[in-house]
Image (cartoon, grey):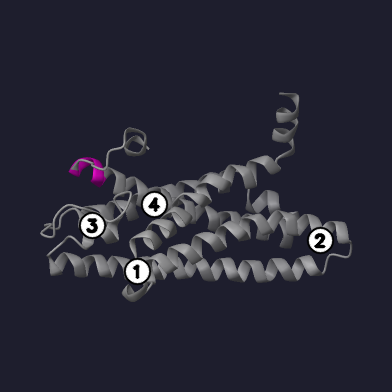
Amino acid sequence: MHNSLWGTTTISYTGCAAQAFFFVFFISAEFSFLTIMCYDRYVAICKPLHYGTLLGSRACAHMAAAAWASGFLYSLLHTANTFSLPLCQGNALGQFFCEIPHILKLSCSHSGYLREIWLMVFSACLFFGCFIFIVFSYVQIFRAVLRIPSEQGRHKAFSTCLPHLAVVSLFLITATFSNLKPPSISSHSLDLALSVLYSVVPPAVNPLIYSLRNQELKDAIKKM
């Protein structure tokens, strides 16, 4: 934001490391919360009578703490490994922020690059596990919704799930394509567009999708 407002395109080495750390931290926490929200919808629709037990304040606090703690540890590992590598390909990134894959392109250390590859493989396994959980949850949710006899009940359930599903789909598709696309179709403008779609749009629309559906918030906005 500072660079955009002041028309500069530079950042200090320490600032770049901090930016990479917080970016990975928040993006991984975002995905964790999207997974937790999926579980919330699964319990609310498939096990409504157990909602207070399974998702009480203590359970929510534990899940939130686990999301932040795992995001912090994951980000720390990535950032420490990336910024321990010597850079021998200059210091110009083809991105509007310090994204780790673009920093690795400037490195000339094969051992550090291999460590990062193993971290990426581990990340992909976690990512895939969350993806399978989300798919399984939504299969159960849609089966339960289709059994609801009233059309109003089905509409209410779908309106609760579809915004979350749209954000998850946007996040997963753009993040996966951004990291796994073949080099033959890689371009500067495409990289920028994909980065905005998976890093900026999902967090930006969260308040719109989740908070503005809250009746108390709607009433407060009407009073204002």
Q: Can you tell which mark lies on residue 186?
A: 1
Q: Secondary structure at mark 3?
A: helix
Q: Secondary structure at mark 1?
A: loop
Q: Residue furthest top?
A: 224
Answer with left or right where residue 211 lies relative to residue 192: right
* Residue placed under numbered mark 4 in the picture: 71
Q: Amino acid at mark 4?
A: Gly
**Is residue 39 in view from this perspective?**
no
Nearer mark to the viewer, of 2 and 3: 3
Per the model, the C-alpha gap separating discs 3 and 4 is: 20 Å
Q: Amino acid at mark 2?
A: Arg
Expressed as whole percent of the image width and height from the top left, the position of residue 175 reads: 44, 63
Per the model, the C-alpha gap separating discs 1 and 2 is: 42 Å
Query: Mark 4 or mark 2: which comes first in sequence?
Result: 4
- Number of numbered markers: 4
Query: Mark 2 or mark 3: which comes first in sequence?
Result: 3
* Residue placed under numbered mark 2 in the picture: 154
Q: Which residues are magenta?
A: 13-17
Q: Amino acid at mark 1?
A: Ser
